[in-house]
Amino acid sequence: MPDISVIRSGGKLTVSQQIKLTAQLSWPAMMAQLSSIMMQYIDAAMVGRLGADDSASVGLVSTSLWLFWGICSAVTMGFSVQVAHSIGAGDYGKARGILRQGIVSCLMFSVVVAVIGAAIAYPLPHWLGGNDAVSPKASLYFLVFVLALPLLTMNYLGGGMLRCAGNMKVPGGLNVMMCLLDVLFNFFLIFPSGQIDLLGMHIPVPGAGLGVLGAALGTVSAEIVTAGAMMWYLCFRQQGLDIARERGSFRPVRDVIRKAMRVSAPMTLEHAVICGAQIAVTVIVAPLGVMAIAANAFAVTAESICYMPGYGIGDAATTLVGQSYGARRLDLARRFGYITVSLGMVTMTLMGIVMYICAPWVMELMSPVSGIVDLGVRSLRIEAFAEPMFAASIVAYGVMIGVGDTIIPAAMNFCSIWLVRLPLAALLAPSMGLAGVWLAMCIELSFRGAIFLWRLLSGAWLRKGL
């Protein structure tokens, strides 16, 4: 089995070896994504047992939370990509310096974002069209997550740095641990005390009975524990990036910050406008009723298991292309781009087929309410047809991030979702209901995949890198 160090050493890699190396890095990255998706399934399934109003309170602010999480995650990528380039060039001292500056800069940025989030937590559900039964719980759920953003950002930074160094196993393993902790914390925090009947014995089970608040506290607690473990491994154990073993300055340097902003600023803006569009979709769905809000949120969560492999392969693509680019092996970077995108499209096509078949069982896992299940199944089966092209956009974006090309891909994402998805959703929702919103999404994702494939094949992304 080939090792990623072959890229840095200049060794020859056959096409077969490149495919094996891609699979080698993609598998643990996909497992990390799977654990993250399973956390969303767990939260949705547990909260779904509390009723439609509680489900809607979580669904109402979920897209807004993605906005805040995504902005902080995008900021960390500006430093992770530079670390990948430095490691590809064999300059570990520079990589450690970038890591130190990344820790300070990302913490400062995430604190500012958390303050902004806390300031809008109360009015946000009302802005999104929530009623009095849903809004108070939605505000509290949102507030818990945004207050924890600085620590959650360290989780994103630690995982991104380890993956860009070629270490996919540790982030994957820690994310599996986070999933298990989420189950444990949520179980005791969401539901009230009760008992389990086992072999004729009545075993008391303690519970806080916090409902929606418990779901937020449980997930945040699991992520904070994981963030601590991720940063400890990165700073003390990861070869080449173990900054705890030597002294160095944490003061941000202009050139590093400038390059980080060149990568992160378009990604941050792009994520903000995409999540802004998703929030706008929530506003379009809200007048359709509580059932539609809950079904939309659960369907979005359920569908995420289809694109989980795409983001995992996209992470591997960023690492492989980034290190190849840092080592000045442009032909190798191009080939890794083609291989990873092809692998992503095949994998997500299979996942789309599975989702189409299993949609009823997945939605029944999310909610016992038949009206929510029926709406969700119809939505998922519409979306399943877009999975191959959605994969192309996800993985091609990861390829382009690897070289630091983010401005044009960010503009492509922005134009696709704002000029195609939103107008179509607004046009179709009044006559088709929630199905119209998801049909608009299916059409837009297919269009987005097509334009990303065009840019990948053109090779323009290699000329626009750092």
Image (cartoon, helix red, strand yellow):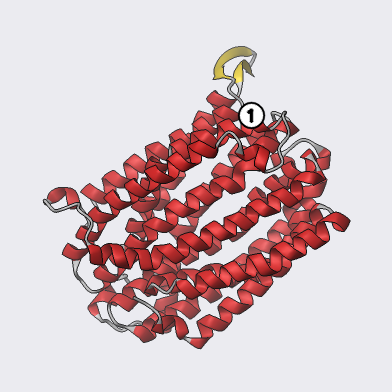
**Which quarter of the figure has residue 112?**
top left
Answer whether residue 56 is visible to the viewer in this image: yes
Pick out the residue farthest to the right. Answer: 431
Pick out the residue farthest to the left. Answer: 247
341 lies above or below 70: below
What percent of the width, then of the height, locates residue 343? Answer: 54, 72
Q: Name the quarter where the C terminus is drawn.
A: bottom left
Q: Is 384 left or right of 202, judged from the image as shown?
A: right
Q: Amino acid at mark 1?
A: Pro
Answer whether residue 305 is visible to the viewer in this image: no
Q: What residue is drawn where x is 45% and y is 74%?
A: 400
User: On the image, numbered disc 1 is attached to which residue?
Assistant: 136
Q: Is 387 left or right of 241, judged from the image as shown?
A: right
What percent of the width, then of the height, locates residue 279? Answer: 64, 51
Compare residues 4 and 385 and report the one nearer the observer: 385
Q: What residue is drawn where x is 53% and y is 82%?
A: 455
Q: Secondary structure at mark 1?
A: helix
234 lies above or below 126: below
What percent of the width, then of the height, locates residue 48? Answer: 69, 35
Q: How many marks?
A: 1
Compare residues 423 and 24 and report the one nearer the observer: 423
Q: Residues within 10 Å of mark 1 (few under 14, many from 20)?
A: some
Q: Name the quarter where the N terminus is drawn.
A: bottom left
What percent of the width, then of the height, locates residue 89? Answer: 23, 74
187 lies above or below 384: above
